[in-house]
Image (cartoon, helix red, strand yellow):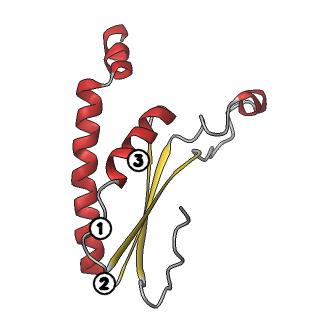
Amino acid sequence: MAAPQLSDSEFPVSITISLPFPTQRLASSALQAIEVDTELSSSVRRTMTLTTPTSENGDEPQEKKQKQDPEESKSVLQTTYRATTNRMLRVAVNGFMESLGVVLGVMKELDIDVLKAEMEG
């Protein structure tokens, strides 16, 4: 589904939050868990996508970049909020952070890969 184009005059206040995850699977799980909760206010719009981490220093070899599946490299949950006022943006982001805390807590407690890494480490 394509995201509707939002006018800067209608929703002048915005923030983009980029959350890196260790794997694409965990980022996708977080996206699926959080995106089902729609914004309660018509004064707030949220878009969520998975993106590829940006490499600031380019240390990753070009050979590895070419072998990686583009979808598998998308391990950053990017969330953009647009709102009519600063207060509405703050309330929406606070709710998002609370939901994110629950999702991350469940991942920490129940995710098999996370448990396996803790046992090996």
Which badge, 2 or 1, comes first in the chain's sequence? Answer: 1
Q: Secondary structure at mark 2?
A: loop
Nearest to the observer: residue 36 or residue 64 = 36
Residue beneath the point at 34% across and 84% down: 84
Rendered image: mark on residue 30: none
Residue under pointer 2: 85
Contact, mark 3 vs mark 2 (Cβ under 8 Å)? no
Q: Residue 107: horizontal and vertical position, in percent?
A: 29, 32
Left or right: 78 as drawn, with respect to 74: left
Q: Secondary structure at mark 1?
A: loop
Nearest to the observer: residue 38 or residue 108 = 38
Residue under pointer 1: 39
Real-space CA distance between mark 2 and mark 1, rounded to the nearest whole angstrom: 15 Å
Residue beneath the point at 49% across and 85% down: 8
Quadrant of the image occupied by residue 60: top right
Quick one: which residue is furthest to the top in this view? 120
Q: Secondary structure at mark 3?
A: helix
Q: Residue 39: horizontal and vertical position, in percent?
A: 29, 67
Which badge, 3 or 2, comes first in the chain's sequence? Answer: 3
Q: Residue 102: horizontal and vertical position, in percent?
A: 22, 43
Residue under pointer 3: 31
Nearest to the observer: residue 19 or residue 42 = 42
Which badge, 1 or 3, comes first in the chain's sequence? Answer: 3
Real-space CA distance between mark 1 and mark 3, rounded to the nearest whole angstrom: 15 Å
Left or right: 86 as drawn, with respect to 79: left
Residue beneath the point at 32% across and 25% down: 111
Q: Residues within 10 Å of mark 2 (few under 14, many from 20)?
A: some
Q: Residues within 10 Å of mark 3 (few under 14, many from 20)?
A: many
Q: Nearer the viewer, mark 3 or mark 2?
A: 3
61 shown above or below 104: above
